[in-house]
Amino acid sequence: MKIIIYTDGACSGNQHKTNKGGWGALLMQGDYHKEIFGGEINTTNQRMEIMACIQAMNTLKNDNFPIEIYSDSAYVVNCINQKWYANWERNGWKNAKKQAVENKDLWEALLQQTRKYNVTFYKVKGHSGDVYNEKADALAQRGIDSLK
């Protein structure tokens, strides 16, 4: 039986040193549902999107089941599905402009997880009424609220 995960990240005051970011994930397998969330200060929305995926996979107990991750982050889904990371790794974590790849620490952690599990990433449209995406968004907001 597969594991379905919906993730989201959020950031209030993006690009300010005193901002607050949150991540959330809803994990589902059959009738079992688990909600997780957390937050960080001085972060970005992009970091929180990646962190949601990492933390969701960190909660898994074994690698026996295929995993589907649904995210409204084109940044995350496209990086994995279009294998942007392969060029980054080959080029010493430099992007096409020969600049350091942003969020390298989180990308490395996410790649370690995706190589451990049988994971497929899917892009969903954010804020479009998808009940699970909306729940992941609410969890990310709870992550921000937990920092107050």
Image (cartoon, rainbow, N blue to C red):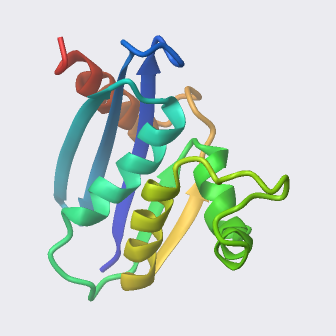
* Residue furthest bottom in the image: 64
User: Is there any visible trace of residue 29 in the rendered image?
Assistant: no
Q: Residue 114 appears in which quarter of the rendering?
A: bottom left
Q: Residue at x 19, y 53 (%)?
A: 33
**x%, y% of residue 37?**
23, 38
| Left or right of 120 in this view: 147 | left
Front residue of 69/83: it is 83
Q: Is residue 4 visible?
A: yes
The residue nearer to you, when weighing 123 against 130, is 123
- Please say if 134 is above or below 116: above
The number of numbered discs placed on residues in the rendered structure image is: 0
Relative to residue 46, is residue 6 depicted above or below? Answer: below
User: Residue 29 location in percent, x, y?
Assistant: 25, 66
Point 39% across, 55% down: residue = 53
Q: Relative to 29, is 24 above or below?
A: above
Of 28 and 24, nearer the camera is: 24
Left or right: 139 as drawn, with respect to 104:
left
Residue for point 55% across, 64% down: 121
Query: Is residue 112 placed above or below 142 in the rendered structure?
Result: below
Q: Quadrant of the N terminus?
A: bottom left
> In terms of image quadrants, where is residue 142?
top left
- State the residue lying farthest toward the right: 97
Quadrant including the C terminus: top left
Q: Residue 136: x, y in percent? A: 36, 37
Q: Position of residue 76 (x, y in %)?
A: 58, 53
